[in-house]
Image (cartoon, rainbow, N blue to C red):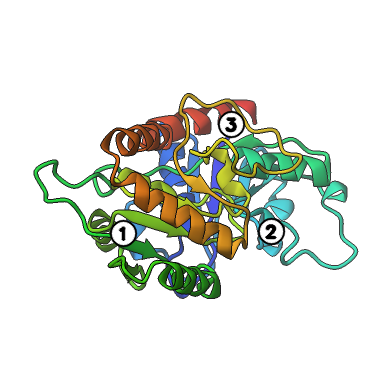
Amino acid sequence: MRRVWVFVPPRPVVSGGMRVLVQVARQLRAWGGLAGVLCWEEPLAEASDLPWQAARSAPLAAGDALLVPEGWPGALTLGVRAGCRLVVYCQNWAYLFHGLAEGVRWQDLPVEFLAVSQPVAWYIEQVTGKAPAVVRPAIDRSLFHPPPVSQSPRPLRVAFMPRKNKAMAEGVRRIVAERNPHLPWQWVPIHGLDPAGVAELLRSCAIFLATGFPEGCPLPPLEAMACGCLVVGTTGFGGWDYARPVDSKAPLPSGIPLRPVPWGGNGWWVADGDMLGAALALERAAACLEIADACQQVRAAAFRTVAAYDAEHQAAEVAAWVQGL
């Protein structure tokens, strides 16, 4: 079996993308294919169980594989010097060329790709001609789960993430307030919380407004679904890996073939940047809350969606990728 090294870049704050790299490293360890985890500076404190090594002194060897996230092509030199197989794990299609010198083409480099979702894989193939395997993120279902059935009905609380296109979220809020001054909307920002805090907040809300763009395989809408929220908003392109509209007349992405999935409409999805469309969709989701059967149907589709993004599915995708190296 080929040994795989995973490079985790330095960041001042632990990002969702870094946590996915850690997930993949743990899956590789369970599979028996993890050589080690590389860092420029200090290892992640929350992943102290992994075999960290200083990137510049790690014993990479010919025949090993080096997995590097998009945006850090300089780290590939570690593998070039050692004669490793080079793999770029693209978690956000918009950053595919980030850090790559002007005039350098991916097609001219001895690299292959791993994608975080089917839309990202499709994008990479269209751009580079190389078809990547897909390894999706996993939701921690011990953290992200619905509130107890006995809990009293949640008020009209809308969770959103200010760091994800704050201007769009603010615009949607103002439109909704302008059109519905009589409704007691409560807008709840998600900011500066650890995963447990995010999950607790989501369980207190009825709706999650997604405003992220660009996205590779956005986790916040999935986490909101897992906590029982109705989801409204944008996919950031990568979210079309799982996003399926409740409304049959909703706009679908142009050009990209959507993969077949075993769930139906799981959210009120609108075009990226469509502020008015998101506000109108938010009103439809709020109305759905008043219709028990319809609301239950959407939540059931959402729970089926989330079930496809667990550790077991991720393990199978990692195993398939490693066997193909």
On residue 195, the disc is: 1
Which residue is at the front of the view, 250 or 112? 250
Structural crowding at the residue carrying mark 1, measured as other residues with C-alpha within 10 Å and reported as few (<14), some (14–19) or many (≥20): some
At label 1, which amino acid type do we have? Answer: Pro
Instruction: Label 3, secondary structure: give it.
Output: helix
At label 2, which amino acid type do we have? Answer: Ala
Residue sticking out furthest to the right: 103
Sequence-wise, the earlier of marks 2 and 3 is 2
**Image quarter of residue 208:** bottom left
Foreground mark, 1 or 3, reads 1
Image x and y of residue 318, in percent: 51, 34
Structural crowding at the residue carrying mark 3, measured as other residues with C-alpha within 10 Å and reported as few (<14), some (14–19) or many (≥20): some
On residue 94, the disc is: 2
Task: Give the residue at mark 3.
Answer: 321
Q: Residue at x 34, y 69 (%)?
A: 187
Instruction: Label 1, secondary structure: give it.
Output: helix
| Separation of marks 1 and 2 at Cα, in angstroms | 25 Å
Sequence-wise, the earlier of marks 1 and 3 is 1
Position of 59 compared to 304: left or right?
right
Image x and y of residue 218, in percent: 50, 52
Would residue 54 be visible to someone looking at this image? Answer: no
Image x and y of residue 59, in percent: 57, 52
Q: Residue at x 73, y 45 (%)?
A: 123
The answer to whether the residues at label 1 and label 2 have Cβ atoms under 8 Å apart is no
